[in-house]
Amino acid sequence: MLAHLRRSVVLIVICTVFFGFVYAFVGTGVAQVLFKHQADGSVGANGSTLIGQNWSSPKYFHGRPDDIGPYAGVGDNPLVANGKSGESAATNLGPRSKVLLANTEALLKYWHKLGVTPTPDLVTTSGSGYDPNITPLDATVQIPMVSKATGIAPSVLKSLIARETNGAQLGFLGSPYITVLQLNEALARLR
């Protein structure tokens, strides 16, 4: 019986060392070598390219609505998803929801006040509520707002959007997208 107990303890120690330390360190090492930017959180001087930022000024392109944007009081709040505080997710409001309708109408008013005819993406959150990307169309409809606020010609902003557009991953997965942080950093370099 003592031999069985000793084997069990030795196996527990070996498994703890391997799965608790070796596996974790190897995984971290592989991530640092192959995916350094993502493993480090993609944090730059102005924020992360993996998490949507707050762009409240009409001098910048805005992302999809979330809890930290300028329209946080009117749109989906992923930090209070389905009545539970602290979660990051969409609210899962259905198409017949009066709350969803009121939020969407408020977001439409917000965008119209800025002189933008929004796309559906600009008045709805993504699945996580923190999407850092928008479609080229989402950026294009914001050109009049940004042009008016910055004095930059619409044609220059169109070229900027074209330069900052990323294609579908591997050429066929998903659709073209723009990371709002990178677009606004490129916009700041224009000025």
Image (tube, rainbow, N blue to C red):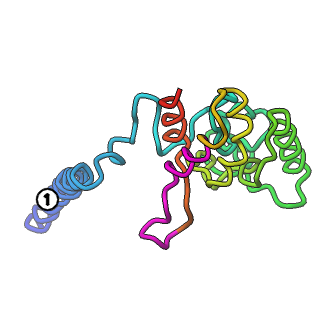
Q: Amino acid at mark 1?
A: Ile
Q: Is residue 110 above or below residue 21?
A: above
User: Is there any visible trace of residue 1 in the rendered image?
Assistant: yes
Q: Residue furthest left?
A: 3
User: Is there any visible trace of residue 87 in the rendered image?
Assistant: no
- Number of marks present in the image shown: 1
Find out whether residue 31 is within the magenta segment: no
Q: Which residue sits at x=50%, y=48%?
A: 164
- In the foreground, 100 or 131: 131
| Residue 191 appears left or right of 139 | left
Q: Position of residue 84 (x, y in %)?
A: 69, 44
Q: Which residue is mark 1?
A: 14
Q: Is residue 118 above or below residue 106?
A: below
Which range of residues does the magenta coloring cover? Answer: 157-173
Q: Is residue 175 above or below residue 182?
A: below
Q: Position of residue 117 (x, y in %)?
A: 81, 46
Q: Residues within 10 Å of mark 1 (few under 14, many from 20)?
A: few
Q: Which residue sits at x=54%, y=52%?
A: 162
- In the foreground, 78 or 169: 169
Q: Kindly state the secondary structure of the residue where label 1 is placed.
A: helix
- In the foreground, 70 or 158: 158
Find out whether residue 158 is within the magenta segment: yes
Q: Position of residue 43 (x, y in %)?
A: 40, 36
| Residue 159 appears left or right of 71 | left
Q: Position of residue 148 (x, y in %)?
A: 73, 30
- In the foreground, 68 or 146: 146
Q: Is residue 6 above or below residue 37?
A: below
Q: Which residue sits at x=49%, y=36%?
A: 186
Q: Name the image quarter holding the N terminus.
A: bottom left
